[in-house]
Amino acid sequence: NMDRLFYKVFHNTYLFKTILGFIQEVEWVNYDDPSQITSSNRYRFKDIVSLKWMVQNKMFSLLKCKLEANEYICMD
């Protein structure tokens, strides 16, 4: 049963934190070559605050999420 499986994963602290960690670091920028992805060009969603960066990189969904969540956005 999927509900039971979800419940087990949700209540397993290690799995839950691991899944949330991956969700927070999901790439919204697509790369043609996977070797372009490095630790220096990955950002956690909560660390992206620049309105200019979000607009220049067409991260409108991220901007919408931040506005709906009333998160800090730097008007640079």
Image (cartoon, grey):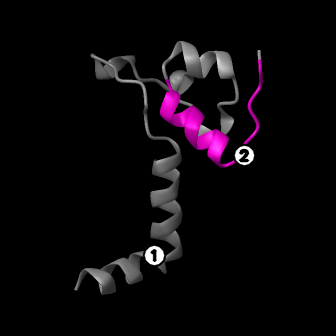
Q: Where 48 falls versus 15 (above or below)?
A: above
According to the image, label 2 marks what residue? 70
Q: Hey, which residue is sitting farthest left in the picture? A: 1
Answer few, some or many: residues within 10 Å of disc 1's Cα (few below 14, many 20 plus, some between 14 and 19). Answer: some
Q: Is residue 40 left or right of residue 5?
A: right
Q: Which SS class for mark 2?
A: loop
Please provide percent x and percent y for residue 66. 63, 40
Q: Where 35 falls versus 44 (above or below)?
A: above
Tell me whether circle 1 and circle 2 mark residues in contact (CB < 8 Å).
Answer: no
Q: Residue at x 47, y 50 (%)?
A: 23
Please provide percent x and percent y for residue 22. 46, 49
Q: Nearer the viewer, residue 34 or 72?
A: 72
Tell me the quarter of the picture where residue 8 sits: bottom left
Please provide percent x and percent y for residue 68. 63, 46
Please state which amino acid type lies under the numbered disc 2: Asn
Answer few, some or many: residues within 10 Å of disc 2's Cα (few below 14, many 20 plus, some between 14 and 19). Answer: few
Q: Where 34 falls versus 11 (above or below)?
A: above
Separation of residues labelled 1 and 2 (CA atoms): 26 Å
Tell me the quarter of the picture where residue 45 sits: top right
Write down the region rendered in magenta.
59-75
Is residue 50 visible in this depiction of the protein?
yes
- The C terminus lies in which quarter of the figure? top right
Assess whether residue 68 is covered by the magenta stretch: yes
Q: Residue at x 48, y 20 (%)?
A: 58
- The N terminus lies in which quarter of the figure? bottom left
According to the image, label 1 marks what residue? 10
Name which of mark 1 and mark 2 comes first in the sequence.
1
Q: Residue at x 50, y 70 (%)?
A: 14
Please provide percent x and percent y for residue 50. 69, 23
Q: Which SS class for mark 1?
A: helix
Please state which amino acid type lies under the numbered disc 1: Phe
Is residue 44 visible in this depiction of the protein?
no
